[in-house]
Image (cartoon, rainbow, N blue to C red):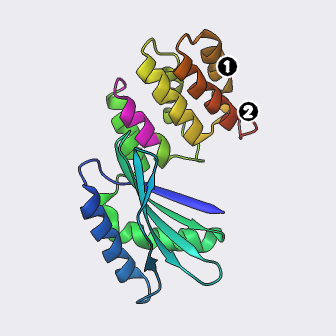
Amino acid sequence: MSVIDHVLAVNVPPPQAAKALEAAILATQPVGAFEKQAEQQIGEMMFTIRWLRGGVPPVALDLTFDSSVPMLMVSVICDDDAIGTRVSERLLNEMNALIDSPAQLRDAAAASPDDPTLLVRAAVAYAYRFDGRLFTLIDDALRSSQSSLRQAGAKAAALVKYGQLLTTLRHAVEMETDESTARMLALAMSKCQGAPGA
């Protein structure tokens, strides 16, 4: 299954993002191809609006708002990688002004290494794609003396699944004194085991 995530600019409110995605769908797909589904609340911090296109293979477009980061993202979900990529590219062209590129997000995290939300936003954009500069930012966060940065490093590591982070994660788990952070680090470690670079 192919899942392609695009992170929207931090100043885009959810209603504007939903309207922009609907406009992009209309501009790039046959009329009526996608049907809007019910909004879904996921826990206390997230909600998702899904648009679904039936057929073989089906394609889902999710607009997700995570208030814990905070972050808005558009995800293209499809069993066929080629079709998912084509739909993603069309949407990206239509919504380009609202979407931060992975490099923009990584560079913002590098410019403000003490801001945990920027690191997590960058990790979403680079999920499953190795980037040496982002690896260094996550590695540094995992070694930080600040628990908020170690937690952000753990979230980011779980998202990108870089096997190269296992050594740092093992050390961080051994040294961690905060129970909540230790659980997050252990989860990140389980996500990175067996990943490329492990």
Residue at 23% x, 49% y: name it: 11
Where residue 155 appears, as percent x and y from the top left, is 52, 34
Where residue 163 appears, as percent x and y from the top left, is 68, 34
Q: Is residue 33 visible?
A: yes
The residue indicated by pointer 2 is 198
Where residue 172 appears, as percent x and y from the top left, is 60, 16
Where residue 104 appears, as percent x and y from the top left, is 36, 45
The residue indicated by pointer 1 is 170
Among numbered discs 1 and 2, the one appearing first in the sequence: 1
Span of residues in magenta: 113-122
- Mark 2 neighbour class, 10 Å CA radius: few under 14, some 14 to 19, many 20 or more: few
Residue at 39% x, 29% y: name it: 116
Magenta residues: mostly which secondary structure? Answer: helix
Residue at 24% x, 63% y: name it: 16
Q: Looking at the image, is mark 1 or mark 2 nearer the viewer?
A: 1
Q: Amino acid at mark 1?
A: Arg
- How far is the residue under mark 1 from the one under mark 2? 12 Å
Residue at 33% x, 63% y: name it: 96
Discs 1, 2 touching: Cβ within 8 Å: no
In the image, residue 18 above or below residue 25? above
- Using the image, tell me which numbered label, if any, was put on residue 87: none
The answer to whether residue 136 is magenta is no
Q: For this rendering, which residue is in front, 44 or 104? A: 44
The answer to whether residue 120 is magenta is yes
